[in-house]
């Protein structure tokens, strides 16, 4: 039920129905304040509203409640990247990769390597960026600061 309610809140936020999303989320928070997924939903709604710093705080709260889930680290890493806090992003994406190993799951792995490689480029650590690119499929593309491919990152390492 919790998962269903949180998805409903995210859908409301996606549709920019923030008042209703916040009303439901306040009730969910009162009933489930120690549930990390409530805080990742807080972060999602804040992020949709352009409140990056508050979203980062919400994700930090989620991580403090459950530090074995890669999703809050991954999402916070992206937010750190977007605001130019590349060292913080590298740390979070490193945590994601370790948690992928811990869970024996590749769900977030390639994305984490991609963002970490681009973060390494931003701080001038090109050898580490190239090393991370070895874990990324040729032709993979995603939006970091712009739409990029693995090959774009490698060319920035030259």
Image (cartoon, grey):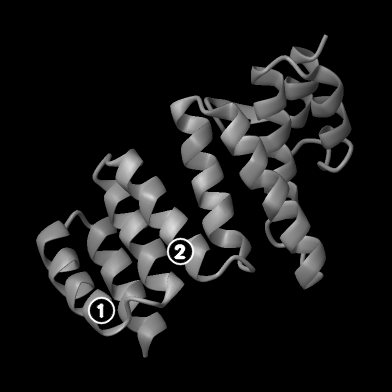
- Residue that lies at the very extreme toward the front in this rendered image: 64
Q: Position of residue 23 (x, y in %)?
A: 13, 70
Q: Position of residue 12 (x, y in %)?
A: 23, 65
Residue drawn at x 42%, y 60% is 61
Q: Horizontally, is 134 left or right of 40 in the view?
A: right
Residue drawn at x 79%, y 27% is 129
Q: Which residue is mark 2?
A: 62
Quadrant position of residue 87: top right
Q: Position of residue 123 (x, y in %)?
A: 67, 18
Residue drawn at x 27%, y 70% is 9
Of the 4 image quadrants, the one containing the C terminus is top right
- Above or below for 158 versus 31: above
Q: Is residue 33 visible?
A: yes
Q: Could you say whether the residue bearing mark 2 is in a helix, strand or loop? A: helix
Q: Position of residue 149 (x, y in %)?
A: 70, 30
Q: Which residue is mark 1?
A: 28
């Amino acid at each position: 039920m919790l998962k269903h309610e949180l998805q409903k809140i995210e859908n409301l936020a996606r549709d920019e129905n923030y008042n209703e999303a916040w009303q439901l989320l306040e009730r969910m928070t009162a009933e489930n304040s120690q549930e990390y997924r409530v805080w990742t939903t807080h972060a999602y709604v804040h992020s949709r509203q352009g409140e990056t710093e508050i979203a980062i705080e919400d994700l930090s709260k989620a991580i403090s409640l459950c530090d074995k889930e890669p999703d809050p680290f991954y999402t916070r890493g992206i937010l750190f990247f977007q605001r130019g806090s590349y060292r913080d992003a590298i740390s979070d994406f490193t945590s994601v990769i370790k948690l992928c190993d811990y869970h024996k799951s590749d769900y977030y792995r390639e994305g984490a390597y991609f963002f970490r490689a681009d973060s390494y480029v931003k701080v001038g650590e090109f050898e580490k960026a190239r090393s991370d690119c070895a874990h990324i499929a040729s032709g993979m593309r995603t939006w970091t600061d712009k739409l990029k491919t693995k090959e774009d990152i490698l060319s920035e390492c030259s």
